[in-house]
Image (spheres, grey):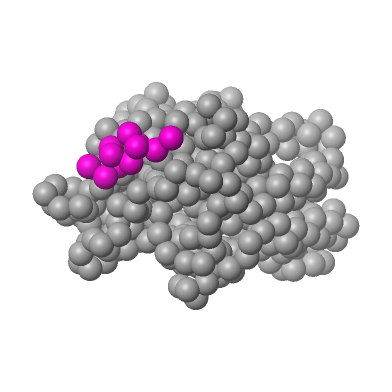
Amino acid sequence: MADDETRTLSRAPSAPTTTPAPPSGAGAPAWTTRLVLVGLVLAALNLRPAITSLGALFEEVRDGLHMSGSVAGVLTSVPPLCFAVFGVFAPRLARRFGPAVVVCAGMVAIAAGLLLRPFAGGTPGFLAASALALMGIAVSNVLMPVIVKRYFPDRVGSMTGLYSMALAAGTALAAAATVPVTDVLGGSWRTGLSVWALLAAVAVLPWLLLVRDRGGRSTGQPSAVREEAEAPAFKITRSRTAWALACFFGLQATAAYITMGWMPQIFRDAGVSAGTAGVLLAVTMVMGVPLAFVIPRVATRMRNQGPIVAVLGACGLAGYAGLYFAPAAGAWAWALLLGISNCAFPLALTMIGMRTRTGTGVVRLSAFAQSTGYLISIPGPTLVGALYDSSGGWGLPIALMAGLMVPQIVVGSLAGRDRTVEDEAGMRD
């Protein structure tokens, strides 16, 4: 498998280009790569519990903070907004301090935010502490593909799959375990939310060890600065592939946030019990655990990832069709299909690494695709809610969800073409 990935990623470009510097992780001590591997998995586990743990206790939080409906609606839009705004700063921070330092700081921010927000003393403090945790998630989101490209340049697919699988596991774990853990610890939503700070604190440790070894190559800081200086300048916005990947990322994120926010209610309104609706959502999220490992490995063996995009999109269309015509009768099948469709997320992360040739390119593409994508995803869940309120049913919202799957397939197929953003944009300056 590694040989297949190496051939895919090291293929010579079609046009003459400047030879990139060797990846800064190449030749790193074995203990360093093992520590980075542990750090990647632990960091990925912490990239979603801040969101899904809150969703599990949202009603209790609203009551406890006397939060109005409008403020609660704003709170549901805070994660993608923070991901978009703070993710933009990740490349500059990585150039200045090194990716490992920034990820370490991100884990510290997540731990501090999760620990502080339940006890912040009101809605403004809760929102501020949530923003601190989401800021840490945002910069770490952007730099995960960068770390993979830097330390595992010949295993982009398998390493992306590994941390995507860990991310999906953390998402499902927080969604499923927050309420039971809260009950065991006395029933207070404040305790139930703050407990996830412990997981983030554990994730700080491997990155702290990497940062402390400043004399070696583990932080990547000297190589990152040198590579940035030597790489040819280019504007990421001149690349059609970058725009296609950003739109693909945004549309798949829209589908994911709509699914997490509204799918249980769709099933409940169709006559499914509340408990079963929650399990169906958990099934949808758990599908991402094995498939997040498999899909990136398959993607790196293909010159064009368009067929994978089409298969995932077809599963989404079938799932939405089922929700429209027989939501209760085939509920388990629709949950499985939508879980498969939501695995467009690890595919998008894999393509970020495959559509670049240099460390500088992957930093810029990751920041651009994710920040732009999360901005695109912000209106989706709110629009679905507005359509539901105005129409009094789920027909129009489900039609919207299915309709968005079509452009997702189109832009995903464009992003999956065998080319790099450096070739498209870098040589035109």
Residue 184 rendering spot, x and y as whole percentages: 35, 61
Residue 271 rendering spot, x and y as whole percentages: 77, 58
Q: For this rendering, which residue is in front, 2 or 278? A: 2
Q: For this rendering, which residue is in front, 204 or 428? A: 428
User: Looking at the image, which residue is at 78% across and 37% down?
Assistant: 388
What residue occupies the far right of the structure in this picture? 325
Can residue 192 be seen here? The reply is: no
Residue 272, above or below 65 = below
Residue 377 rendering spot, x and y as whole percentages: 62, 37
Residue 384, above or below 405 = above
Residue 139 forms part of the magenta stretch: no
Q: How many marks?
A: 0
Q: Main secondary structure of the magenta part?
A: helix
User: Looking at the image, which residue is at 28% across and 39% down?
Assistant: 226
Q: Which residues are magenta?
A: 222-232
Q: Quadrant of residue 111?
A: top left
Q: For this rendering, which residue is in front, 29 or 312? A: 29
Residue 428, above or below 358 = above
Residue 312 rendering spot, x and y as whole percentages: 71, 60
Residue 387, above or below 46 = above
- Whether residue 127 sits left or right of residue 283 in the image: it is left
Q: Quadrant of residue 284?
A: bottom right
User: Looking at the image, which residue is at 47% across and 67% down?
Assistant: 6
User: Looking at the image, which residue is at 39% across and 30% down?
Assistant: 89
- Whether residue 403 sits left or right of residue 335 in the image: it is right
Can residue 237 be seen here? The reply is: yes
